[in-house]
Every structure is written in C-alpha cells, then in structure tokens.
Image: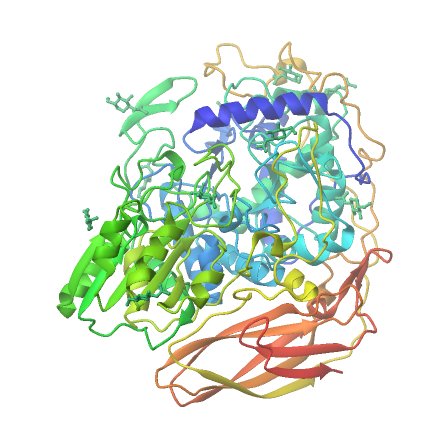
Amino acid sequence: MHIHSVLVGAAALAVGASAQTDGLSPPSYPSPWMHGGQGWDHAYKKAVEFVSGLTLLEKVNITTGTGWMQDLCVGATGGIPRLGFNGFCLQDSPLGIRFSDQNSAFPAGVNTAATWSKKLFKARGEAMGEEFRDKGVDVILGPVAGPLGRSPEGGRNWEGFAPDPVLTGVAMAETIKGIQGTGVIACAKHFIGNEQEHYRQQMSSNMDDATMHEMYMWPFADAVKAGVGSVMCSYNRLNDSYACENSYLLNHLLKNELDFQGFVMADWGAQHSGVASALAGLDMTMPGEQVFGVGTYSYWGGNLTAAVLNGTVPQWRVDDMAVRIMSAYYKVGRDKSRIPINFSSWTRNTTGYFHTLGEADFGVVNQHVNVQSDHKHVIREIGARSTVLLKNTKRALPLNNPKSVAVIGEDAHLNPAGINSCDDRGCDKGTLAMGWGSGTANFPYLIAPVDALRAQAETDRSTFVNISNNYDLNAIRAAAAGKSVALVFANADSGEDYITVDKNEGDRNNLTLWQNGDAVIAAVASVNPNTIVVLHTVGPVLLEAYKHHPNITAILWAGIPGQESGNAITDVLYGEINPSAKSVFTWGKEAKDWGVNILYNDSSKVPQMTFSEGNFIDYRHFDKAGIEPSYEFGFGLSYTTFEYSAIGVRKLQDDEYKPTTGKTNAAQTFGTVDKSPSANKMPKGFKAVKAYVYPYLDSTTGNSEGGNGDAPKGSQDGSKQRKLPAGGAPGGNSGLWDEMYEVSATITNTGKLDGTEVVQLYVSLGGPNDPPVVLRGFNDLAIPRGRSKAVRFKLTRRDISNWDAGKQDWVISDAPKTVYVGASSRKLTLKAVLA
Ligand SMILES: *[C@@H]1O[C@H](CO)[C@@H](O)[C@H](O)[C@H]1NC(C)=O
Ligand SMILES: *[C@@H]1O[C@H](CO)[C@@H](O)[C@H](O)[C@H]1NC(C)=O
Ligand SMILES: *[C@@H]1O[C@H](CO)[C@@H](O)[C@H](O)[C@H]1NC(C)=O
Ligand SMILES: *[C@@H]1O[C@H](CO)[C@@H](O)[C@H](O)[C@H]1NC(C)=O
Ligand SMILES: *[C@@H]1O[C@H](CO)[C@@H](O)[C@H](O)[C@H]1NC(C)=O
Ligand SMILES: *[C@@H]1O[C@H](CO)[C@@H](O)[C@H](O)[C@H]1NC(C)=O
Ligand SMILES: *[C@@H]1O[C@H](CO)[C@@H](O)[C@H](O)[C@H]1NC(C)=O
Ligand SMILES: *[C@@H]1O[C@H](CO)[C@@H](O)[C@H](O)[C@H]1NC(C)=O
Ligand SMILES: *[C@@H]1O[C@H](CO)[C@@H](O)[C@H](O)[C@H]1NC(C)=O
Ligand SMILES: CC(=O)N[C@H]1CO[C@H](CO)[C@@H](O)[C@@H]1O
C-alpha cells in the first residue's frame, strides 16, 4: 500500500511546487496563539511548563514527522531523548487500528450514525480509544466530518457519518469524548471541503461563507467544543489556496472563530510550503518529508529551525505549535495513559525494523497484544441497531421458524482468498463489511451472513441452502424457488483514490449494485414470492424497482457493519433486535436526483469545484426541488408501530446574544532560543537513521520554498489581537449554546412488540434561502409495547440562527420559524410555531 502512497505523494509535490499563490482566500494573520480556556487551562499550564524547558530543536522535533515508514506508526514525530520523551505515534483509522492484528474492526461511521444513538456513538469511541491506547498510539486519526457527503458517490463518505451537519456534529462530539476519555487524542478530519476523491490533491473546493458555517464547518465546531485535541487539514484547496496553508481557514475560522486550542496536522503530503504553512496555522507536518515515502528533506525539520533562526517564523509561533501539541497530550491524560508502542504498521511478522525505510534497528516490533477486550458486543449491537428496515410487507419479518431458507449472493459469503487478503480492503470480493483505503483495519475475524444464518437455521431445524456464485443465475433460481424465504445479499463499495477497484477511483462511478447484484436480485425475485433483500452498501443505491416488486417483501440496509456482520443481520432478521435505525442519507430514484456530482474528468491544473448548491445537499435538495425519493433521510421501519402526539413548545429564555469583544493577550515565548549554529546542527557522532527527517540545520536549509519564504504582512505581529464577535470560546461564541426553546412530544408504541423509535426534530428557519426543514435534534426512545414516553429537545441559539456573512456572525432572522417532530424528514407529524 505504501507503493501507492509514494506515487500519490510525488504527484502532490509536483503540483505544490508549481502553485505558490495564496489564491483568493482572504489573508488572516497572525496565527492565533493558544491561551487555554474552557477545558484546556490545566493542560495549557502543564504544556507551557514542559515547552519552556525545550530547545528550539526539541520544539521543532515534535512538530515534524520523521518520514513515512520511519517509525512504527503511520505517522510519527521526533522525540526528546534528553527527557526520555518518545515522539508522537499517530495511527489510522476511524473504525479501528490500521496495519495491526489482534484488534477489532468496528462498524464504519455511516453505520454508527444510523443508530442515532448518542450512547452508542460514545461507546464505540471509548472501545476504539482503549484499543489504540493499549497498542501505544497517541493520536487516532479520526473521527471524520469531511467528507460530509455532498455527493452520494463520494468515495470516503462512509468514513464519516451523514450528509447532515447536526447528526454528524453530535456523532463527532460523542465519538471524541469516548476516545479522549480513554487517554488517547482524537483527530477531527479532514478540514475541509475534501468531498471527493478525484483530484483531491490539487482541486479547489469553493464554497461561500454561509455554506461553510451552516454546513461543512458545523460538525467541526462541535468537535472543537467537545475538546478535540487535533484537527487534520485536508488535501484540497479552498478558493485556490491549499487547506494546510490557507490562513483564512486555519487562522481565522478554526483557531480564531472556533477558538481551537489543540494542534493542526497536515494530511499525509498535504503540506506544500514551509514558512507559509507555519504562519497560516499548521502545527504538525505529516508524514514529515517533502516527497512522500522518500524521506530526508522536509518543509519543516531543519527548515523550520532555520526559519525561526532567520526570523521569518517568530519564536512565539513555533512555541505555540509545541504548546498546542503538548496541551492535547496533557488534556487527555497521556502523561498517565501512555505505554510504549507494541506493534509495527509495516510488518505482521514479530520481528522487523524499528525504522523500516532506513532499515535500522532490527528487533521484536510486534508483540501481538490482543486489545479486543469484549468490544465485539458493542460492534454487534451497533451492527444490528444500524440496520435500516426500508420495506416490510406481508409480515415477512421478523422470521419465525421458517421451514426452508435460501441465502443467495456472493455478499453473504467470505472472500475465499481471505478476509484481509486485499491490502486496505482494496477489492470487492465476498461480503462487504468495510470500504477501502486508509480508513480501514484488519479484521480479527469476520462473521459472514451465510454462516450466522446457517447456525440459526440449524437451531430452528429449517432446511438451508446457499449460493455464492453471482454469475450462475440458473443455480440461484433453482436454490431460491420453493423456499419459505429467500435472503439475497448484494453490495456497493467505495474508498480512497490511491486504490482503484473495478475502475472506481475511490468515488463510485454509479449508484447501482456491484458483483452483478441487480441480476441476482432479479433472478431470486422472479421465482420466490418471499424475497428479502439485504444491502451492504457504502451509501445509497438505486432501489426504486425493488421497492415496488411484489415478490420482494422486505429490504434492509445493513451498511458496512464490521466484524460481527452476520450476527448483527441475523439478530435483526429473526427479531432478536427490533430494528430502530433510520437512513442517514436520501435514497433517490436516479443519480441525477441529487443535483450534484463528482468532478470525474477535468484536465485543468487546478480543477474547480464550486459548491453552487450551497446548503442544498441530500434531503435539503430533494425537499426544495420537490423530488420524491425512494426513501427519505431519516426513514426506517420497526416491527412495531409508533404514534406521535401532544407537541409542546416552551420558551426558555430571551437573553440577548452578546457578540464577543475585547482583545487577546499578546503572544508569549517559552524558553530561550540558542542561536549559535553549533546548538542547532546535528551533534558530532550522532547516529542518524538513513533518510530520517531531523530538526537540524544543514547545507540544504534556509530556503524551504524555493525563495518564496517571506512572511506575509502581519504574520509576525505578536501583539494583542481583537477577538471575533462569533468567537471567544471553543466551538464559537458561548451564547450560541444558549437554550432558547424546549420542544416536547409524546410517543406511543401502538404495536405488539417492545421497540425503539428514533424521534427527530426539524426546524424550518423560514428565510427565502433556507431549506424547507433542517434536522436539529434526535432521540432514540426505547418504549415498551402499549406504553408512551415523553421526549424533550432543547433548541439552542445556533439551532435557530443563520450565518450572516455581512455581519460575520450568527443571527436569528425575523422569518417565522416552525418546529416539527416526526419519524423522518418527510413524516413531520407534529408541528408548532416557534414564538
Ligand atoms: C471563498 O470565497 C467565498 C466567495 O468570495 C467567500 O465567501 C469565502 O469566505 C471564501 N472562503 C475561504 C476559505 O477563503
Ligand atoms: C529528534 O527526534 C529524533 C527521533 O526521536 C531523535 O533521534 C533526535 O535525537 C531528536 N533530536 C533532538 C534534538 O532531541
Ligand atoms: C516477514 O518474514 C518473512 C519470513 O522471515 C520475510 O520473508 C518477510 O520479508 C517479512 N516481511 C516483512 C514485511 O518484513
Ligand atoms: C455455502 O456457504 C459455504 C460457507 O459457509 C461455502 O463454503 C459454500 O461454497 C457455499 N455454497 C455454495 C453452493 O455457494
Ligand atoms: C456500477 O459499478 C459497478 C462497480 O464497478 C459495476 O459492477 C456495475 O456493473 C456498474 N453498473 C452499471 C449499470 O454499469
Ligand atoms: C413472483 O414469484 C412467482 C413464483 O412464486 C413468479 O411466478 C412470479 O412471476 C414472480 N413475480 C414477478 C413479478 O417476478
Ligand atoms: C476525459 O476527457 C477526455 C478529453 O475531454 C477524454 O478523452 C477522456 O476519455 C475522458 N475520460 C473519462 C474517464 O471520461
Ligand atoms: C529563512 O528560512 C526559511 C526556511 O528555510 C526560508 O524559507 C526563508 O526564505 C529564509 N528567509 C530569510 C529572510 O532568510
Ligand atoms: C529545505 O527546503 C529545501 C527547499 O524546499 C529543500 O531543498 C531542502 O532539502 C530542505 N532541507 C531539509 C533539511 O529538509
Ligand atoms: C514495548 C511494549 O511492551 N509495550 C507495551 C505493549 O502492550 C503491553 C500490554 O498493553 C504493555 O504492557 C507494554 O508496555
């Protein structure tokens, strides 16, 4: 897999070298320095104390990656041997430990979101945090809020949660709290606009300020409010300026307005300049070298040392980088939770190099520590509770002792070559339980649907037959005909662009099924009047035909549920778990229904993707354009039924919003810098690892960006700075979280089974440019049959505000606002005016 990455890195460099302009993004300097505050004071104090005792080289060391494959993790910084402080270990992925063994493979983000359960969001974060912690990882490279999911074809959408900022924001916050509670730093990524895989390394995502605030940045604000320790800037540019050197993005929006106190790291190879990125707010470069996979030379490392010594980067800026990094470390308690790394990303063998690229220090690198604990339970629970029941006619489900069962489809079976046989899951063979790319983990085991269903059939003494070959339609029809139920499995996959699967370069080329899935379903449904379709897809596929097919009695979306796939779907099919999941995206009837698309083919040097649809993605677009989907956002059935009644709205307060005023403190430096060349060169006799990135000055430093390393105007100004009206606290002005209204309703379980209903709160903001409704709250309510439960939602000021680009602040418009409580984005049963 690193071969692919080397190629990608080289391409990125070529582009970077030719594009030194800062585009059309407004400049914003100086880079805000950390000041502590809400949730950070204690960590900040400790970090300042620590950093005050460091030399310049030591500070630079913890900001700079040591190079791809140079240490044990996918990302590593230099350490401080003088203090016995190991460098940082950063590791993929958002659904489990990548490049490891004896780890769990969790449900993907999209499944997690589909549970709509804050408790499960957090429980998954906690379980993942424990696993990373116990392997010695400092920073887990997740969770994902970018891509948000602008286009359904987007290759990495499944790594994130949902194309809705509120659902994603809540999932981000709870996941981060779960992870960081275990003593591991989380990383909110990718900031921002990385909405497709094609051209991600050079394209420019252009969005207006309101769309930035109301959609794409919203879940990052929640991440910052939840105290996330790090944020990863993305590959793409915004308004032509690379995200990792875009001062408006990092300095103005993230560090000033959102008051982010942690550190910003570059996506792997997303840095394209030394001085410019440092002054624009980048704090850590990954994987460290200029040419991905080649090592030795860096935009930072010795060049950052040189830039501080020659005065281009002020000392307070490098001190701030170090303080931010160490504050994240102390904030999550890594000073107490840290253990030495006990695995290597680069071999599954027990022995290997500690510095793989440099081929140095051979020894035991993998202790194969089993970190799975009892996490399979939460994995199975999320798997089942994320399975959306889209259709259920003729009481097809739940299954109850069927006489005979046929399980059809390659997607019900394991990849015969092995569950981890394709690097980074870069193939679509057998059942799909994870997409492909860096957002993956090795499966410790994978329960195939066919095996779990066969075990259930044995318990029930049902006759059982299965077919895995999707191209033998005769055998499929023969097996399905005459059975009490035919369960047919199909999938659709996507992933990251460095792997192409069946001509899909990360992003999906279409929205139909893979592996001949449509033909398989058609064959089964042509002979069996009780055909049940199970979909393992990374996002929506076109299923309008199945919705109306009389022989297809049920359709379920099981997403990409991770290692317990077969057990989870069996739990739902047989009613062990009454489904409660709701779809976290819209199922359109045809691809053009979504109104946006991936830029697949563009020969310009910097392909431009202008998000001219603004806020109108997914259900916002379908609603506005009046397009009837197959199934809407928020839709999902249960084996029981629920009724909604008695909406109530209570105004909680009417306090005025106070724009933040005043000034920050002046920038501070911590410790002194010894400017003598001898203090900053590689010590005599130092045993350097081949191709390793070090912080030392050498003959190649002092010119880190081709003679264009001058400091932009204002970037060296360390004086007190004016605060932004919308800023002042993590996530933005604290007044945004004032609770303005309480909305209540009563939900009654009117069916014959206990069940859980995901109750949704939508608001119509009422303005001419507002979507008909936007999601603002949700609650998964477990309600015994025949009983009622009250549900209460709080609406915050942010929930009922719009971003006013002119005022540069949130405002509650004069437009009349309506609140809805319902079972989906189109079943808005209860309605009240917000007054
Ligand atoms: C990009 O340009 C648009 C239009 O001028 C502006 O509204 C937006 O704030 C800019 N965003 C960034 C990150 O520069
Ligand atoms: C920088 O980090 C590397 C790797 O941990 C280490 O070998 C080197 O000694 C460090 N340099 C300083 C000045 O601490
Ligand atoms: C693992 O060990 C085998 C056998 O000693 C060796 O051939 C192989 O190169 C090793 N793999 C790696 C990635 O080091
Ligand atoms: C049925 O499933 C098993 C795995 O449980 C598999 O080995 C076998 O090949 C499948 N049978 C057919 C006919 O596909
Ligand atoms: C859609 O893409 C998948 C995966 O490449 C492929 O198997 C399928 O045939 C394509 N569908 C159509 C209609 O071309
Ligand atoms: C439904 O299944 C029956 C077999 O039970 C078959 O005769 C009929 O043609 C099927 N209907 C459709 C629309 O395929
Ligand atoms: C991309 O566009 C070029 C020229 O416009 C064309 O030759 C090529 O076939 C297109 N490629 C794809 C994948 O559509
Ligand atoms: C200072 O050093 C940096 C980093 O190598 C370089 O980019 C920049 O051009 C230098 N500036 C001056 C004024 O020497
Ligand atoms: C500093 O940057 C320059 C220009 O990008 C590069 O040629 C040089 O190798 C870098 N030096 C180090 C020590 O990374
Ligand atoms: C190098 C090393 O042994 N690191 C750790 C590996 O994991 C075990 C169990 O969690 C720890 O005890 C080790 O310190």
Q: Tell me: 808 left or right of 185.
A: right
Query: Where's ligand 3: which quadrant?
Result: top left
Depth check: give the residue in front, 725 or 752: 752
- Does residue 540 appear anywhere in the picture? yes
Depth check: give the residue in front, 269 or 215: 215
**Where is residue 552 shown, x and y percent of the image?**
37, 66
What colour scheme does the image use?
A: rainbow
Q: Is residue 342 above or below residue 66?
A: below
Q: Quadrant of the N terminus?
A: top left
Tell me the residue at 29%/43% (across/down).
102
**Where is residue 9 shown, x and y percent of the image?**
55, 25
Depth check: give the residue in front, 407 or 75: 407
Q: Quadrant of the C terminus?
A: bottom right
**Where is residue 166 shown, x and y percent of the image?**
61, 63
Tell me the residue at 30%/68% (across/down).
530
- Does residue 217 appear anywhere in the picture? no
Q: Is residue 610 above or below residue 776?
A: above
Q: Is residue 73 above or below residue 538?
A: above
**Where is residue 462 shown, x and y percent of the image?**
15, 67
